[in-house]
Amino acid sequence: MDYQAVLNEIAEEIKPYVGEGKVADYIPALAEVDPQQFGMTLTLFDGTQYSVGDADTPFSIQSISKLFTFTLALDAYGYDLYRRVGREPSGNPFNSLVQLEYEHGIPRNPFINAGAINVTDALISHYDSVARTSKEILSFIREIADDGMIESDKEVTESEMQHGFRNRALANLMKSFGNLDNDVLEVVHTYFEHCAIAMNSRTLSRAMLYLANHGEDPITGKKFITPQQAKRINAIMLTCGHYDASGDFAFHVGLPGKSGVGGGIVAVIPKVMGICVWSPALNEQGNSLAGTKALELFTSKTGLSIF
Amino acid sequence: MDYQAVLNEIAEEIKPYVGEGKVADYIPALAEVDPQQFGMTLTLFDGTQYSVGDADTPFSIQSISKLFTFTLALDAYGYDLYRRVGREPSGNPFNSLVQLEYEHGIPRNPFINAGAINVTDALISHYDSVARTSKEILSFIREIADDGMIESDKEVTESEMQHGFRNRALANLMKSFGNLDNDVLEVVHTYFEHCAIAMNSRTLSRAMLYLANHGEDPITGKKFITPQQAKRINAIMLTCGHYDASGDFAFHVGLPGKSGVGGGIVAVIPKVMGICVWSPALNEQGNSLAGTKALELFTSKTGLSIF
Amino acid sequence: MDYQAVLNEIAEEIKPYVGEGKVADYIPALAEVDPQQFGMTLTLFDGTQYSVGDADTPFSIQSISKLFTFTLALDAYGYDLYRRVGREPSGNPFNSLVQLEYEHGIPRNPFINAGAINVTDALISHYDSVARTSKEILSFIREIADDGMIESDKEVTESEMQHGFRNRALANLMKSFGNLDNDVLEVVHTYFEHCAIAMNSRTLSRAMLYLANHGEDPITGKKFITPQQAKRINAIMLTCGHYDASGDFAFHVGLPGKSGVGGGIVAVIPKVMGICVWSPALNEQGNSLAGTKALELFTSKTGLSIF
Amino acid sequence: MDYQAVLNEIAEEIKPYVGEGKVADYIPALAEVDPQQFGMTLTLFDGTQYSVGDADTPFSIQSISKLFTFTLALDAYGYDLYRRVGREPSGNPFNSLVQLEYEHGIPRNPFINAGAINVTDALISHYDSVARTSKEILSFIREIADDGMIESDKEVTESEMQHGFRNRALANLMKSFGNLDNDVLEVVHTYFEHCAIAMNSRTLSRAMLYLANHGEDPITGKKFITPQQAKRINAIMLTCGHYDASGDFAFHVGLPGKSGVGGGIVAVIPKVMGICVWSPALNEQGNSLAGTKALELFTSKTGLSIF
């Protein structure tokens, strides 16, 4: 298939949608991003990349980082991790706190904020230090993205610390149920730090290869998690990857994916490729509007849905 | 692959699980079923079938019928159907009524009871008669199952009518929001009637072929719905097919599937086969315990997960 | 105290508020009522009445009837009644169904719809017939109001039957939990029937005397319930008498009271008098806007709050 | 009435209940209290006191302090205080967080934890310093209790700080909605500090006189709040003073009251007296079991209910 031609077509057809929606504005660092940007990259198993648009512009990966911390925690804890965090879709955002309360402080899945904060806490306990946890997360992401220059944006982290009261509420609620080992502020800070990592669509699509290839990097041959763990991460991405629009994403796109409030969306086509699309303006559910549309066009044009 | 050998292995390994759990007991007709039964059938696109165990014993398909009424309604209404019913996972059962209330009488998806009752109502409006609706549903199921003798069990229907007060509560609540066209008792009766259809694992696995084959029956060549509609039904099965254990099913089995309280579970491997497994005793989430386990063994042994 | 002068002052000061708000419009029979009406009556223990405005105009008592059915059921069942219905405030209306579900079909108190429907069901079981239940309720109200001509309005009842799907949802939900003895439609019809009773502010204020006088009619000397039961009905009126504005009513008015969607509000000053005020237009919480204001003026002017 | 005789009778009849229930055990300082204690004091408007049992033993007033901070905040802000905190009952404890979320960070009333934390925040803003706020609260309580030696227990405060994660969750959630002015940890610390004030039933019953007497201390003649404000605090005590057992308390006791998890309950008989009863073991709703029972006996024996 001529992937470059497909991307070019998508870039053309997506134009009316780019900038539609609303850039995340709860912290200044995100609010200032120009909404008129769009980039998309496909990375095949041999490392070939096809890109279109602003594929080299770095953006805040935000919730996409939840994939990577979950991978590390799954590797560290195995099946025991599910004592702390579930794998069921979470329903509407209104329910986030009540579900956490009703379910005794066990978050529904690792991709809602409470779940990812809990996973971060698990990593801090595992690595036995906040500093080492941050270092290991960054090091893992650099490795799977094959880019040693990736960094977290301190300004974004500090800005989150000044505004993230709801996340502190979630962490305190889990702590009140005994489902958080470490200091609330340290956990939340570490969480914000990995959300603030900046990448572009090239590096992020590259970073998805191990998930598209059953846990093994197809280029370096390095095995990060078992095939079963990789498949199961993909299953959780499909059912829980886009908050309360997860069903809609599965319905329209038909691929395991994960979105971030910075406007990025990653997806995998099992055994075929890693994908990343980025456009900063978000739809009502908080997922990139043009990005979601672009992925829908991609599966329509290529027939590459898992269904 | 030697599918028969795989099924034989599964039948052997599943033995300790058969009968574990609890048969649905809210109506006498279901409570009397012997839990020590297990049957499983695979149907390939050329019609070849591989079976093991009690594959010819009929059982009440219950919620599996929601797949078929949803197919008919999608064909009749197209995208407009989503004005009445959504496609997002529904969260825990405790939330069923509150979600329906909070979301103004629009059920989250067609596979929870409220959604399926609403779909039945849509069909009654479309066919303009209760009697014709029942006839069309039965006729469609007989066609996709290639079995003209399939019938609904009157005793089960009447028993449901005497106990189904929660379903009437859901229907009345939707009606109070203006999201139900027809008489509550007639809609609920029609719904119970198609839930009470009796089939066995041979006929049900045969009936899944059109969903495994993008809307077209691979044996007769008849097109029931568009490829896109079929893929999207599969996506909804994956995210919403097993109530609040949908995430868990995707996680462990990795296939689009739909369970019923009669102990049946159907699943599809896109472009490959239709599957049905049956064992009456249910796990805590109301899905066949041995059936879920058997499907998990099947994807482990064959590697045929969509992820 | 010159009660007539107080009423005259209130009638003057209330003028800007009469007609403000919105007449209940969910059934035609209520929607047609002229909002520009206001009537108020005080009835002392010796039978002396002070009235102002439209005190002789009959209106639909609606939820005020819940007081009278609760009295009858308390007399019939005593403390056992609280196995079926609680006495705690119910929180916001959004919670009505979820609370009923979360609390296993036991309504929070007898003054929310679910509670009053349950109380009606208890009366049907006690009197062993729908017809006799309706007759006993009407007969009791005629006796405490000292008016043998009081009737229920058939048109209002039938109109409710055609629209009251939420009430049927509540009744079916209770039935699904085993907390409703009789046929859902018969219970709901009986409930609508006593809600549709028409009275005016003279007869309703007269009817409150037994509650102001610890269960005994101060004029006839007839004892309907024990002093303790009467005090406890007053306590429930204070904490639960005005749906989710009960706290606000206690705060502003400081008297046990009960409102109805027909625009009536009754209140008692223990050991002193019965009160009824009526004005059809409702505030956002569904209580008479001018009526609530008039009662607030009354307690301010007379100092007759229980606090 | 011979109040001393009444108290003696109560002390005798209450014996089987003293120690029944469970002492609050979420922090060590409370868990260590001997449950076999019971004290009760009535204080009349002329200062006469009637006591029985352990009336001189100090205990942690805990939530009873909410009455006093609410009084100070009402005096400082007047009606504007209700922009930050409501006055409706709060329903079951399960709803605490969801209600706060659903109602956009505005707590339902000043007597649930979120409401009292918010009131403390209002005081810190008003006094413009944490230190001065603590000083003013203590000074006010010493004045109304006529006891200059009253102190807050540092050990209890620090113990709360080490365990009070749910309260921090509530404060952070309000802060995320913009309904908290000051630093979360400082607000929560100040809140814990006034909860940790130690008093006995003599001083607490004395401290209730201003509320029984429409805002004015009947002994010193000092006016703290307006008569209307005092009546309204009493109304909120009646509807919201005992968490989700407020309806039950109004039903059984029939007096405005406020309980604390230290086992104390205060109540007022308007224009007559202040009351305090203490016994450390709590019932399932978190209110003193023997204390509630003693107050029920008191109103039964004296007929002094407000209804």
Image (cartoon, coloured by chain):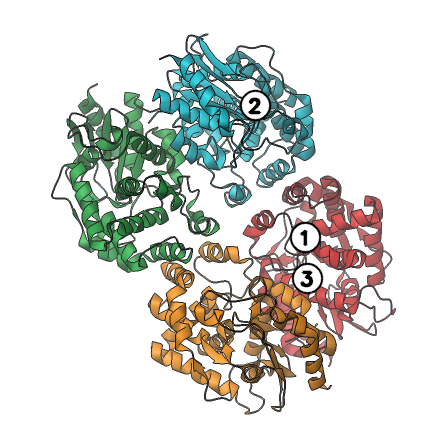
Chain colours: A orange, B red, C cyan, D green
Query: Which mark, residue B258?
Result: 3
Q: Which of marks 1 and 3 is nearer the N terminus?
A: 1
Whether the residues at callouts 2 and 3 have beta carbons within 8 Å, the answer is no
Q: Which amino acid does label 1 sit on?
A: Gly
Q: Residues within 10 Å of mark 2 (few under 14, many from 20)?
A: many
Please state which amino acid type lies under the numbered disc 3.
Answer: Lys
Q: Nearer the viewer, residue C245 or B117?
A: C245
**Image depth: mark 2 or mark 3 in front:** 2
Q: Can residue B16 be seen in this view?
A: no
Q: In which quarter of the image is the C terminus of chain B?
A: bottom right
Helix, strand or loop under label 2: loop
Q: Where residue C93 appears, x then y in whole percent?
A: 52, 41
Residue B15 position, x and y percent, is: 63, 67
Q: In this view, does B186 lie to the left or right of D118?
A: right
Q: Where is residue A61 in the image (x, y as percent from the top left)?
A: 50, 76
Q: According to the image, label 2 marks what residue? A: C61
Q: Nearer the viewer, residue C20 or D233?
A: C20
Disc 2 versus disc 3: distance between alpha carbons?
50 Å
Using residue D239 as the reference point, say whether residue D14 is left or right of it. Answer: left
* Same chain assignment for discs 2 and 1: no
